Image: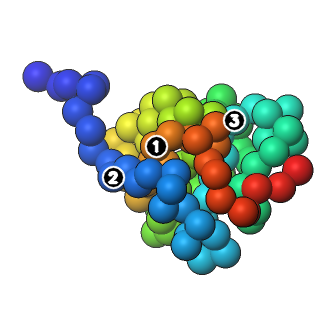
Amino acid sequence: MFNIFTKSFDSISINEVDSLIGHKNIIDVREAYEYQGGHLKGSRNIPMNILMMDPDNFLNKEDEFYLLCHSGGRSGSVARVLSSKGFKVININGGIMSYSGNNFEY
């Protein structure tokens, strides 16, 4: 039986993200207005609904992507679906609302 709740991707804490900035692909799946209200430096905004319509148009299955949202829920859902389609994704738990580092910009 297929279990949609089976975790098939890795996760990291938002507190681990600073060392990734500038070195890894960080995708912020929040809506554009949320992203414009503040985001991680170097992150790329691809809203969840747009990304899920055609992930092959935005992501290369050979690359690894770190997914971020407000609290970790949306990015976790996206990670679950993308990993089932063969993408290498890692969810950032806690989301931007829990971020306290120095790599936040508007």
Q: Earlier in the sequence, mark 3 or mark 1?
A: 3
Secondary element at tag 3:
loop
State the residue in front, 105 or 4. Answer: 105
Question: In the displayed structure, would residue 103 be above or below residue 99?
Answer: below
Q: Is residue 32 shown to the viewer in this render?
A: no
Q: Percent from the top left, x then y, of residue 52?
A: 58, 35
Q: Which amino acid does label 1 sit on?
A: Asn
The span from disc 3 to disc 1 (Cα, nearest Å) is 14 Å
The span from disc 3 to disc 2 (Cα, nearest Å) is 20 Å
Task: State the residue at coordinates (83%, 55%).
Answer: 105
Of the numbered discs in the image, which one, if any, rests on residue 30?
A: 3
Residue linked to disc 1 = 93
Question: In the displayed structure, would residue 15 be above or below residue 6?
Answer: below
Task: State the residue at coordinates (50%, 68%).
Answer: 63
Residue linked to disc 2 = 10
Task: State the residue at coordinates (72%, 63%).
Answer: 102
| C-beta proximity under 8 Å, tags 3 and 1 | no
Task: Indicate the quadrant containing the N terminus: top left, top right, bottom left or bottom right.
Answer: top left
Of the numbered discs in the image, which one, if any, rests on residue 37?
A: none
